[in-house]
Amino acid sequence: MHVRDTVTGYGIVSRGFHWLMALAIVAMFVLGLWMVDLDYYSPYYHSAPDLHKSVGILLLIVLALRLGWRLASVKPSDDELKPLERTAAHIVHWGFYALLLALMVSGYLISTADGRPISVFGFFSVPSPGENKGLEDAAGAIHAWIAYSVIVLAAVHAAAAVKHHIFDRHPTLSRMWSGPPTS
Ligand code: HEM
Ligand code: HEM
């Protein structure tokens, strides 16, 4: 089993980061949409946003680790892609990192605009940069737009991966799913 990435595929660490985060991001999107419509008398009125914020901060930490790992790793070869596809894949992959960072920072700003810290499952707290009431709405609108953009981008990205797998018969999806070929 490959731990690190090689020119022929992704190692277990990159694959773990990729699929864990993909699952968590979709779950966070669904949770976010559901929780903003809860009314004050719902038993989840406080616990759902607490969960969303705690998981969000953990995902920010995971994103930083993932980015560090990505920068320190070799990139599996994309020579089989046409130049236009290769450029599109680069834009989408780096676009994901930029959008996810902005998503998490905007989420942090909504949550801390009232001056209160974020408690991450009660284990540790992330302090507020200071009270800034006006920021809450602007950061909330930006957060929602970025969340929708990430999901649209993920759908296009997944469709491209499936297209390469089924129609072009390239190992793009298998090297992200099962890693570099063993033989
Ligand atoms: C994977 C990352 C995340 C995703 C996919 C995500 C997604 C969402 C979505 C879809 C909403 C509902 C937006 C709306 O319709 O108004 C939302 C709301 C919210 N999110 Fe996130 N979020 C993420 C990370 C975070 C983080 C890191 C925090 C804070 C630390 C956070 C805090 C909030 C808060 C406070 C709201 C409620 C905003 C309001 O009341 O309008 N989110 N999120
Ligand atoms: C929210 C969901 C997703 C996000 C944020 C995401 C993000 C990324 C990123 C940033 C990369 C670049 C490699 C890296 O830095 O780790 C990547 C590669 C890849 N993703 Fe996703 N992904 C998501 C969902 C999916 C889904 C659903 C599929 C397949 C159905 C998929 C298939 C792939 C494949 C095959 C690669 C490798 C591409 C290559 O080697 O050129 N991803 N993804």
Image: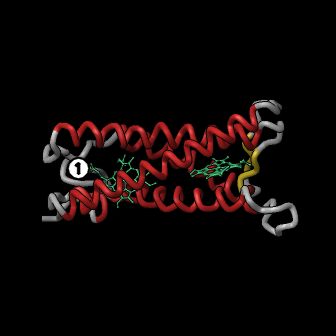
Image quadrant occupied by the C terminus:
bottom left
Left or right of 101 on screen, residue 127? right
Q: Where's residue 134, x and y in %?
A: 79, 31
Q: Is residue 177 placed above or below 142 in the rendered structure?
A: below
Q: Nearer the viewer, residue 109 or 39?
A: 39
Q: Residue at x 45, y 50 (%)?
A: 152
Image quadrant occupied by the N terminus:
bottom left
Mark 1 lies on residue: 6
Q: Nearer the viewer, residue 25 or 119?
A: 25
Which amino acid type is marked by label 1? Thr
Q: Residue at x 46, y 57 (%)?
A: 22
Q: Residue at x 69, y 41 (%)?
A: 140
Q: Where's residue 166, x and y in %?
A: 20, 64
Q: Residue at x 59, y 58 (%)?
A: 28
Element class at badge 1: loop
Q: Where's residue 107, x and y in %?
A: 66, 43
Q: Is residue 36 placed above or below 144 in the rendered structure?
A: below
